[in-house]
Image (tube, grey):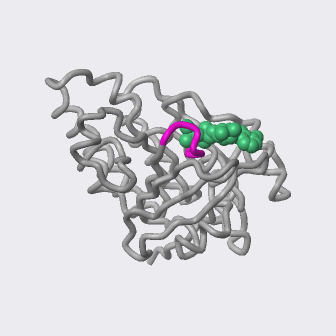
Amino acid sequence: RKRCIRISTGSKQLDVALNGGFQTMSVNEVYGEFRCGKTQMAHTMAVICQLPREMGGAEGKVAWIDTEGTFRPERIAEIAERFGVDGQQAQDNIMVARAYNSEIQCEMLETLAQNFATNQYRLLIIDSLISLFKTDYVGRGELQERQSTISLFMRRAAQMADEFNLVVFITNQVMSDPGASALFAGVDGRKPAGGHAVAHASTTRLLLRKGRGEERVAKIIDSPDCPEREATYIITTGGIND
Ligand code: ADP
Ligand code: MG
């Protein structure tokens, strides 16, 4: 039987809040405004995933679906340096696939399944989940089809998390439609995009926001085994830290 592994976020405080980090065999979603650190957290996780277990890693490779062109190999090298691992090797262990439309984004999961079958991978990053769906499905008339396609994508990702013992790490935006935000106003008035299609498939959801000065705050919104609580973190050259 596969054993669930936890991967550190790079912040001790946030790891504690998450009972040790993000779990394999689950879908983990971070959502928040621009520049709150979603992509930086993805870069940090991509390095930590490769580390030994005693360093918070999972000794595994990483697959990264990049929908916004924001993956930066230089950042991987900088974060690798913090943890004393070779920058080039850290980059080589991350398979990056750039998706330019939502159809390709969906197909990529199937392509990646073949890589995951090697049992060398422990992390699948999707940064970000919704952006291509937003540009490919416009207007009210396409909303239903958009939602059902997102739903299928999320279900497949969740299934792969289980089957291949992966942390699925998804970044998401906050809802941009002010009318809808007002209607669903929840935690701090900020709601993740994607509605039920995303909510149903996410195991753990984290709301990220800017705090005082350089500080950022992560709030656990939805988790099967953690209470709702907050942790602060900062973004450094070496990635997410305390
Ligand atoms: P999001 O994906 O949520 O829009 P990002 O993960 O791109 O946000 O985070 C952007 C923030 O990360 C910016 O505030 C930027 O200053 C900070 N950042 C990026 N690179 C570094 C670095 N090398 N050192 C410190 N902070 C950085
Ligand atoms: Mg980003």
Across and down, in percent, residue 191 comes to: 34, 47
Query: At 53% from the left edge and 49% from the top edge, which residue is drawn?
Result: 209
Is residue 223 shown left or right of residue 213?
left
Image: 45 above or below 18:
above
Residue 183 percent coordinates (x, y): 21, 44
Residue 178: in magenta span: no
Q: Which residues are magenta?
A: 33-38
Relative placement, left or right, of 202 versus 206 is left
Q: Along the line of sight, which residue is nearer the eye, 223 or 52?
A: 223
Q: Residue at x 41, y 40 (%)?
A: 129
How many marks the image carries: the answer is 0
Is residue 138 placed above or below 236 in the rendered structure? above
Look at the image and tell me in which quarter the N terminus lies. bottom left
Residue ID at (51%, 52%) = 208
Q: Is residue 38 visible?
A: yes
Question: Residue 197: image x %, image y %?
Answer: 25, 47
Q: Quadrant of ligand 1?
A: top right
Q: How far from the left and from the top, in percent, is residue 177? A: 30, 32
Quarter residue 71 falls in: top right
